[in-house]
Image (spheres, rainbow, N blue to C red):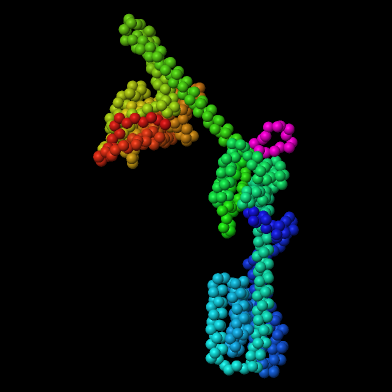
Amino acid sequence: MSKMMRSLDIFGIGGRDGARFAASSPRPDVLRRKTIANNARLMIAIAALAMPFAMWALLAHAALGFALACLVLTGGMLSLSFFHRGHHDEAALAQIGTVMGGGVFLTLIDSRFADLGLAVVLMGPVLAALLMGRQARILTWLGVAAAILVGGAFSFFGFPHDITLANEATLAGGVLFALAIVVVAHTTHHINAGYVVHDKAQVNAYRHLVEHMQDTVICFSLEGDILSASRSSEELFGCPRYQLSSATLGERLHVMDRPAYLTAYADANQGGKNRTIEVRMRRDDPRSGASAPQFIWVEVRFAPISSEATSERYEVTALMRDVTKRKDAEAAMAEATRSAEEASQAKSRFLATIGHELRTPLNAVVGFSEMMTTGIGGELSNTHREYAGLIHQSGKHLLDVVGMLLDMSRIEAGKFEISTARFAAADIVQPCFAMVDSMAKGRKITLDADIEAGLPMIVADERACRQILINLLSNAIKFSHEGDRVTLVVKRQGTAISFAVRDQGIGMAPMALERIGEPFFQAEDGLNRQYEGTGLGLSIVKGLAELHGGTLRAMSEIGAGTTMTVLLPINGPATKMEETVAVIQLHREPATAPNTSWQNEKRKAQ
């Protein structure tokens, strides 16, 4: 980039004149085609001008000039014909063939080895190098080699030396050589001018791009001096760009960021590596009277400029971008995340504290109300016995709510411990049915179990699995109509055991399905909702399933019922690397058979 910028002064491009010059300049390929056409016209014109003299020489019995004029005229017309048909490569080959053919013809006519014919033949590779590709250049050099061999053979074994023919060949060869020189010079001038103009246009385009970029571009020399700075540097640093230097740029760096900046620059300048860092830099504000400096965050990308010169250092281009807003947003996001985590931890601590504080008096309420209903403290009247039963029922309900709050707080805090063991999934179905049997009978709900035969043993926390099934069954019973049926399906699904609870209840809307598992979420959240509950049951189910490495899925349709499915891995939850400790092996034990048992393994929730 720095070499490109320095070359701008040499080319003399700048401002509107450079843009207008670049816009009016043709591309090299277009100029090549025009050069081929002009060469063809030039050959035709020169042959036409030389034709009267060639015909006069023909009357004087000198036919060599007339033959060469016809050859040049034919080659020029053939080349122009190819050009008008769009065959530009064939048109260039016709011109090269005409020049080399004329040279070979002169070599055959003149028996001298060092004649102008070979000089004309040598113009063919030069013209091919300007107009054609690598393959054509190779073919022309092969033609030169063949012409040299033929010329050498004829000089030793050819016609006897004829002074008159030699003089005529020398004169015709001089004219043909001059024609070849004119064609090559014309081609060289236009092709070279085209590439120079094209390079100037590209340099001007790159300069225009750099000057109008929002990011700042600064070019450093091999010694670290600033060669150029784009216009946007004035806005980035708040000062004119001519005031920027390596020393002033270093002074603008924050003291804490200078080592990282110098290291990254050294990697690019000496090691030739791309580096990207974020540093704080001072921005001047002449309109502000504050004495405290204003620092902004700047993303700096160092890129070495590759050079063919053998040097231990590289010129470096630095692309600088103001990322203060992004850094402020990241800091605000980090602060919001920290505040949210603190609020969540405070909520969990509050729920745990309140839960423990409520559980003790509630146990007393439940216990004494149960003693009263059994008559241990004396016989009660029917009314008092009814009141004691209501107290006992309400106390049990509150204990269940407190228990769910404690479970939810432990799950969210990552302190819910599961103890895995191997057991049969079918063994926990009947105990769970027994726990919700009274609730089902109260609503006349029929409980069915569909257990697949031959299920493998599952590695999981049996107490947590019971709680999952009890919560799913209780939820299904609560939202079912009287006389409905609730079915529990247990089967294998790949590498997991599927526990699916299907009811025929009220169902859920698609919007409610998306929020399944959120704490305290209920489909009916108004004050006049029909169904009681805290909305923690499915949240606990989801949390316990995820602790096992499983998932909770829900399918529902309003008025057609709901199916809640929990998938638990057969081999238990996968052990995470952060939960294990690196063990240094002191000696090698004899190889033993691998033990895949997960008995009595404990895993703390993360």
Q: Residue at x 37, y 27 (%)?
A: 417
Q: Residue at x 65, y 49 (%)?
A: 225
The quadrant holding residue 473 is top left
How many numbered tags mark residues here? 0
Q: What stretch is highlighted in magenta?
A: 282-295
- Quarter occupied by the N terminus: bottom right
Q: Which x, y percent locates residue 30?
A: 65, 67
Report the front residue among 185 and 554.
185
User: Compared with residue 197, is residue 175 higher up or lower down, i.e. above or below?
Assistant: below
The quadrant holding residue 329 is top right
Q: Residue at x 62, y 85 (%)?
A: 115
Q: Which x, y percent locates residue 88?
A: 61, 73
Predominant secondary structure, magenta span: loop
The quadrant holding residue 377 is top left
User: Compared with residue 375, is residue 53 higher up or lower down, i.e. above or below?
Assistant: below
Q: Is residue 289 magenta?
A: yes
Q: Which x, y percent locates residue 483?
A: 36, 27
Q: Is residue 469 magenta?
A: no
Question: Can residue 3 be seen in the rendering of this structure?
Answer: yes
